[in-house]
Amino acid sequence: MATPRLIPWPLRVRARFFLAFFLVVGIAVWALLETFSDELRPALLQSAEETMIDSANLLADMAKEDLENGTLQDGRFAQAVDQFLNRRFDAEIWGVHKLTPNHRIYVTNDKGIVLFDSARLAVGQDYSQWRDVYYTLRGQYGARSTRTNPDDPASSTMFVAAPVLDEGRIIGVLSLGKPSNSIDPFLDRSTRKLRLAGLIVVVVSLALGFALSWWLARAFSQLADYATAVSQGKRAELPDVGRGELGELAHAVETMRQELEGKQYVEHYVHTLTHEMKSPLAAIKGAAELIDADMTADQQQRFLNHIHREADFLQQLIERLLDLAVLEKRQSLRETVEVDLTELVRQVTADKQPLLASKQLTCDINIPVRLPIMGEPFLLRQCLSNLLDNAMAFSPTGGHLQWQGQLDQDGLQLSLQDQGSGIPDYALPRVFERFYSLPRPDGSRKSSGLGLSFVQQAIVLHGGQITLRNLPEGGACASLTFPHQVGIGL
């Protein structure tokens, strides 16, 4: 009894492949999101700084006149700044709602002393050592980022300074400040979009990974089922697993199977064929040695007829063996058409009428319906012919044969009954073996023992089954069973 293959192994392959794919995709997406998150805030601050530089230089030119006149605290520049800071607006910026300005502006003289502060916090203080003022007074680009609360990163304000020039001479510094947390809404929005995009990538990738792992596991499972069937000696068709490496593997397995089967097949057939040919060859040799020139013509003719009979038997044996060998090597049907077995039974029975009449046999066809099946007409016709030949060989003179058939939801059944002596119990398990044959009731020589083996191979190739059993009232019944086939005309 064959040991059943454990099915869960392709599931383990699928799970491992899917887990590996999940880890690779998950780590890649996580690393990508982390990189973007780390780079996104500095990028936004740099973009804001570039805009603030332009604004600071524009404001520096606007503050020049009041700085020279000493009217920074209440001059036109201070009034314009106050009006700007008190302005209210309604702006929708890429999904972020902005209502009020959030800039801080202060101006120092050429010594770094604050003369104007829009926040009114630092007037009179010495800012000469702050980076934005310090570097700008020396003709360099000055900027700084300072936390109001050293323990709170969100309290940081970015300042960008521009020189106040009078005919090329630096007479003061204007510094424009903007809270760093003003970019947080944009950062949060971009981060949410990145996370959503990452989640979509992960879900899509996992779906693709699952589909790929399922396809690979299915292909491996098909190959494993094929290899298991071949190892158990069953007829199996090479699965279609596509091209590429899997396709090459499948064809390599098929080639190996053909090579191994071919070697065993030849060895087995050479052995059995030589065994079966010994008797007729010995008979031919013996008859040839007995023929003598001094024999009468009748005696010579009797031995010659014996030689002809044995030669015909050898020819029949070889032809049937070749037909069976070709059939056994096939893994599937060739071009199939719809065949009506009822009509095929009528044709085969009509062809056998001369043989039936010679043995005074009658053969009835009790099939009230069409029996449609998809298959090869030649093989099916040969099967029915072999069955009828076998039934006639074991039927007594004047016997009766009967074909019966039916079609129901379980499929198609066709049977042939005879009124012979039946099959001995010891022979029932072996009737479909190659070269196995029983003595004929009329004493004629045994057949080649290949007819029923051919029938079994052809029926299995059509997806059906054949059984041979004894009937309670005497005789034997050969039954063909085919599963229900979709797509044929009933």
Image (cartoon, rainbow, N blue to C red):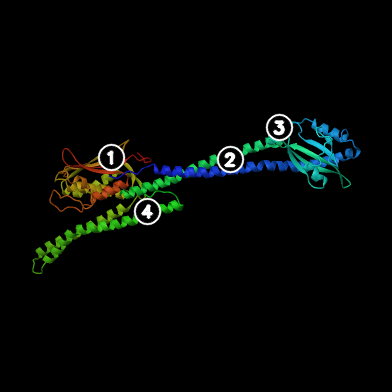
- First in sequence: mark 1 or mark 4? 4
Query: Residue at point 38% right, 53% down?
Result: 253
Given residues 64 and 4, the one toward you in this image is: 64
| Residue at the disc numbered 2 | 198
| Residue at the disc numbered 3 | 97
Q: Distance between the residues labelled 1 and 3?
A: 80 Å
Q: Distance between the residues labelled 1 and 2?
A: 60 Å
| Residue at the disc numbered 4 | 254
Specify the amino acid type for callout 2.
Gly
Q: In this view, does 320 lie to the left or right of 258?
A: left
- First in sequence: mark 1 or mark 2? 2
Residue 175 percent across, percent down from the top left: 80, 40
Given residues 373 and 104, the one toward you in this image is: 104
Mark 4 crowd level (few <14, some 14–19, many ≥20, 10 Å Cα)? some
Query: Residue at point 89% right, 47% down?
Result: 167
Given residues 311 and 133, the one toward you in this image is: 133
Specify the amino acid type for callout 3.
His
- First in sequence: mark 1 or mark 3? 3
Given residues 348 and 314, the one toward you in this image is: 314
